[in-house]
Amino acid sequence: MPDAVDIRGLTVERGGRTVIDGLDLTIPTGVVTGLVGPSGCGKTTLIRAVAGVQVVRSGVVTVLGEPAGSATTRRRVGYVTQAGSIYPDLTTAQNLRYFAAVHRLAPDQVDEVLRAVDLTEVRDREVRHLSGGQRTRVSLAAALVAEPDLYLLDEPTVGLDPVLRRDLWQMFAELAGRGATLLVSTHVMDEADHCDRVLLMRQGRVIADDTPTGLREATGTDDIEAAFLALVGGAR
Amino acid sequence: MIATVATARRVLHQLRHDPRSAGLLVLMPSVLLALFHWVYAEQPWVFERVGPQMLGLFPFILMFLITSVTMVRERLSGTLERLLTTPLARGELIGGYALGFGLVAVVQAAVSSAVAIWLLDLGVDRPWEALLFAFVGSAVGIALGLLTSAFARTEFQAVQFMPLTTFPQLLVCGLLVPVDRMPEPLQWFATVLPLTYVTDAFGSLALGEGFAERVGDLLVLSAFAVAALSVASLTLRRRTP
Ligand SMILES: Nc1ncnc2c1ncn2[C@@H]1O[C@H](COP(=O)(O)OP(=O)(O)OP(=O)(O)O)[C@@H](O)[C@H]1O
Ligand SMILES: [Mg+2]
């Protein structure tokens, strides 16, 4: 199967600084890929480039066989931004119906999606009256209603309790099981264990690209955080 | 088309969840008109002359304001960036805004025209035309609001664009002094500003002239609205730094 995302020589400048420098990367189809790294390393910038909303200096980003951001890929990509970008002055259901409509879909899925992210109770409440964790899930649900082939999830588990986090990672695995591709960023390194593949990122470079097990074995460590520290130490 | 209508509905839903703003938007012009009527109680001819033109100004100014603030909010909250990663076309987004706020403008114009004509005895004997021109004026306001929102980084800046863009228009549009009695350079200036045509149309309505006298205004205003909406949709960049 062709890769879902193919990045060649990507260079991005933001605020006069080079944030991503000559990155080559592929993201395989039908698996959960974790994008892990410290704050400011360029995770959001990379995801924005794949979503086709980042001005790039040079390089080619191909998403589902088309240039990133093209009209065809936009139908098949679901981007959940880091700051839950949903409408606080609409109810949960109104938000989801709107995002379904911009994807030209009937709002049939809304109730099913609300069940999947455990938001049925707050269906008709305005989002501004919801808790931070609930808002995060509304934002995620707004991507789920469109049933995209590629999910770009920027820190979707921040601020959630352990039970919910586990449930969400389970849901990500199920989505991948049904053929979707997921790129999920997090700066909680141990969450990488839920992923099929892990990209460790540091200062705009991907310093490791492996399975969680492979990563631990290669660095002789017990967890991903130790593996990251070992790699950073080695790079010094 | 589905996405345009959905966007218009979304904008209206948002407004419904903010009943205070919605109420202000619809009722404030009527209250201001009544106040104006009262202030000139001793000189009713002033209200007779300026009142109709004010009927056309309110939709323009208010729609300019709410559109630019809403759009800046959409940019800052990240929802715009998200929408631009969906199949939603930029024209559909802008069209949805114009449709949603345009409907609000019609309601507002209907309320303020009814108040002006039946409660305040303003001499406008073609209420439907007053509505039509209020709508076209608001469409230009919406279009200019969308356009200026591209240059505002914060909601505060967006609000400050209001005096910048509307005060000069208020001064030269013919409301205070008829355009043909202003110095010549100001007359040229007035001809490139949309509010001049709104004022002209409402002035002509008040005089009881036939529709033929206002066809030109209607065409110019429609052209303004279409041009500003097109430029506004060009300022919506899918990729940002
Ligand atoms: N709008 C912007 N303008 C200029 N520079 C920016 C902008 N956004 C981010 N940067 C810079 O780009 C670099 C990468 O930022 P990015 O948001 O991609 O990091 P991140 O890995 O997502 O961090 P976090 O985990 O905190 O979300 C940082 O050095 C940041 O300061
Ligand atoms: Mg980030």
Image (spheres, coloured by chain):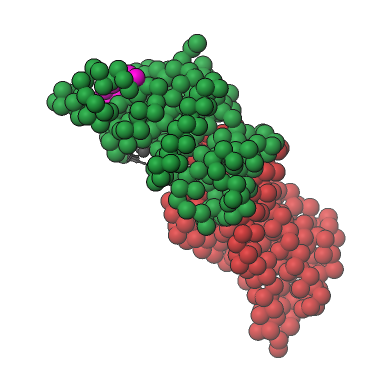
Does residue B40 appear to the left or right of A198 in the view shown? Answer: right
Count numbered badges in the picture: 0
State the image coordinates of residue B182 (x, y, percent, origin top left): 61, 66
Q: Quadrant of residue A18?
A: top left
Name the residue located 57 percent from the left edge and 38 percent from the top edge. Answer: A116
Name the residue located 82 percent from the left edge and 61 percent from the top edge. Answer: B128
Evaluate whether residue B209 shows in this view.
no
Name the residue located 40 percent from the left edge and 42 percent from the top edge. Answer: A162
Question: Is B154 part of what is drawn in magenta?
Answer: no
Q: Identify the chain drawn in green.
A: A
State the image coordinates of residue A7 (x, y, percent, origin top left): 40, 19
Name the residue located 55 percent from the left edge and 49 percent from the top edge. Answer: A87
Nearest the viewer among A102 and B106 is: A102
State the image coordinates of residue A81 (x, y, percent, origin top left): 45, 39
Nearest the viewer among B116 and B66 is: B66
Q: Which residues are magenta?
A: A205-211
Please state, as top left, top right, bottom left or bottom right, where the C terminus of chain A lies in the image. top left
The answer to whether A71 is drawn above or below residue B113 in the figure is above
The answer to whether A192 is drawn above or below residue A67 in the figure is below
Please identify the dominant SS of the magenta region.
strand
Nearest the viewer among B49 and A219 is: A219
Q: Identify the chain drawn in red.
A: B
